Amino acid sequence: MDYEYPELPNELKKLFENKELDDEIRLDKNGTWHHNHQPFKNQKLIDFFNRSINITLDGTYVVHYDAYTYPITVEDAPLFVTGVVFRGFLQYEKITLNLTNGKTELLDVSTLYYKNKALYCRVENRKLIAKFKTSPSYHILDRIDEIEGEYYLKLSGQKILLQQE
């Protein structure tokens, strides 16, 4: 599946590069949206921003909706895994991720890694990073084995070395 990479309008790009934007929209490391250091309160607005997150070809995170594209600050990951569902068994096991952008997708176990005591994976055809919230992380890590100081997950009929970044 091909994904579009929106581009910032040139006038915004210049302001962003010169750090002249007074209006900051930020997604913190816990998944809370902020506007000029104030957390969002309106759940419909939070859901809209979660669904609108994207990345430009040069790696700038943006809120993108129709023709509107605006740069945002992402402290950690642009998406979060809020739930996991296991279906099947052994090599037929599939793990579905529930994401903060409202989408569900199958976990690509080859993209799992951990850093700073948190579990991450790649989603959206490996385009974006998703950080596991605590509960879904425990569901995955419940299947971990330690062998000679390395950690392995038993998922989808595979024994996967969990990479540290």
Image (cartoon, helix red, strand yellow):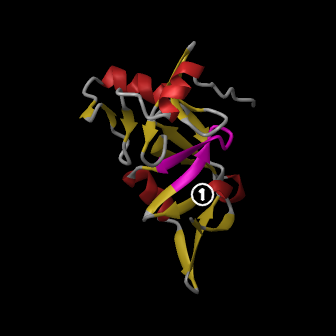
Q: Is residue 24 above or below residue 125?
A: above
Q: Is residue 86 left or right of residue 90?
A: left
Q: Nearer the viewer, residue 112 or 6?
A: 6
Q: Nearer the viewer, residue 92 or 126?
A: 126
Q: Quadrant of the C terminus?
A: bottom right
Q: Is residue 147 above or below residue 153?
A: below
First to last magenta residue range = 120-131
Q: Residue at x 54, y 43 (%)?
A: 97
Choose top left, top right, bottom left or bottom right for residue 1: top right
Instruction: Give SS at disc 1.
Output: loop
The residue wearing badge 1 is 112
How many C-alpha atoms fall within 10 Å of the one at disc 1: few (<14), some, or many (≥20)? many
Q: Is residue 99 above or below residue 43?
A: below
Q: Position of residue 155 (x, y in %)?
A: 62, 60
Q: Position of residue 76 (x, y in %)?
A: 45, 49
Q: Is residue 9 visible?
A: no
Choose top left, top right, bottom left or bottom right for residue 104: top right
Q: Check disc 1 and give the amino acid type.
A: Leu
Is residue 71 in the magenta section? Answer: no
Q: Residue at x 57, y 61 (%)?
A: 113
